[in-house]
Image (tube, rainbow, N blue to C red):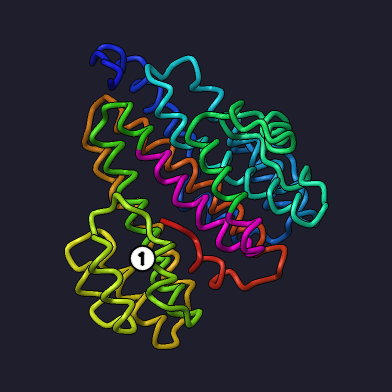
Amino acid sequence: MPKKIRDTDYLAVSARIRAMETGLLTDAQMEQILTAQTDEEAVKLLRENGYPTMSLESPETMDAAISAAREETLHDLQDSVPDENYLDIFRLKYDYHNVKAVLKAQAVGADPDRMLVELGRVPAAELKAALTAGELDRLPATLAAAAREAKETLDATRDPQLSDLALDRWQFRDETETAERSGSEFLQGYVRARIDAANLRALVRTLRMGKTAAFLRGALVPGGTVGEAGLLTAAENGGAGLAELYGSTELAAAAQAGADALGGGPLTEFEKLCDDAVSGYLAGAGLIAFGEAPLVSYLAAREREYTNVRILLMGRAAKLAPEVIRARLRT
C-alpha cells in the first residue's frame, strides 16, 4: 500500500529544495567552466561551486569527485524526505550497475572493486559479498531476482550484452515498483518517461547494429506510454514511421533524430534529445509550489548537472573544441 504523506510533510522539504536549487550550476557558470583558459581554472571554478578537488589528468579522480558530490546530495536530504522511495529512485540504478560489474568480473576471474560505485541502496561490499557467496536472499527481492536471471543468462550464453539487457529490464521494473509504492503520479510519470526514452534508444541501437526485431523484443521494457507492438512494427520496417510513433510525446524531436541516425546521421544529437525529453517532463514541476514534484525535479536536475560536468571535463581532457562539448551537454 502506498505510504500516506500529508501535505504538511512537504512544507519544510519544499522550502529547503527551493533554497538548494540556487546551488545548481547555471548555464553561464557551465559556460565559464567550458571556456576556462586552463584546466586548473576550470577545476577551481567547480571547487568554488561545491565540488571536491579533482584532476583532469585522472578520469578515476574525476569520477570519484562527482560520485562524492552525488552522495552528499542524497545524504543531505536523507532526514528531510518524508518517503525514502523518492531517494531510492535515484539510488537503485547504482545497485544494478554494481551487479553488472560483479557478474562480468566473475566471468573473467577479475576483481570488480575498481568498477563498483558506492551510491546504491546496498553497500557495494555487501552486494559483492552476496553475489560472490551466491546468497542472493541478502539483497532486496527485486534486485535478487534480477541478479539471478542475469547470472543464469551469462552462464548460459556467455554474452554480457544479454545479461545487461536482463538487468536493465529489471531495473526499470524496480523503478516502477518503487514509484508505485510512493503513491506519486508525478514520480510514476517520470519513470514512464525514462522507459519511453530507453525503449526508443533500444530500437535505434538495435537497427544501427543490424539486429532483428526479435532481438529488440528482448530489450524492450514494459510500462511506457508507447506500446511494444508499435515499436516492433517500426523495427520490422527498418525504422519507418518512428517519428510518427512518438509524435505526440515528449520524445518527438528525439524520435526524428533517431530516424535521421538510422539514415547514417550521428547518434550524439539523438542521445542528447532522449535525455532532454525526460527533462522536459520534469519542467512542469516548476509550477508546483510544494510536494514531491519539486523534490524529484531537483534530484533529476542534480543528476543532469553531474552528467554535464563529467561530459565537460572529459571533453576538456580530450582537448575537444568547446562547440563540440557544448553540443553534447544535456539541457
User: Which residue appears at 54% of the width and 30% of the height?
Assistant: 73
Looking at the image, can residue 326 be seen? yes
Q: Quadrant of residue 206?
A: bottom left
Q: Nearer the viewer, residue 80 or 15?
A: 80
Q: Which residue is at the far front?
A: 156
Asked if the stretch drawn in magenta spans residue 175, the answer is yes
Asked if the stretch drawn in magenta spans residue 62, the answer is no
Q: Which residue is at the far bottom?
A: 263
Classify 81 as above or below 259.
above
Q: Amino acid at mark 1?
A: Leu
Q: Which residues are magenta?
A: 153-176
Q: How many marks?
A: 1
Task: Pinpoint residue 159: horizontal percent, then vertical percent.
Answer: 63, 64
Query: What quarter of the picture does the N terminus occupy?
Result: top left
Callout 1 secondary element:
helix
Classify 57 as above or below 324.
above
Task: Pinpoint residue 192: horizontal percent, then vertical percent.
Answer: 30, 48
Q: Nearer the viewer, residue 11 or 170?
A: 170
Task: Pinpoint residue 46: horizontal percent, then vertical percent.
Answer: 63, 44
Per the picture, the main secondary structure of the magenta-coloured stretch is: helix
Q: Quadrant of residue 37?
A: bottom right
Q: Which residue is mark 1?
A: 200
Left or right of 74: which side holds 7? left
Left or right of 239: which side holds 152? right
Q: Nearer the viewer, residue 66 or 29?
A: 66
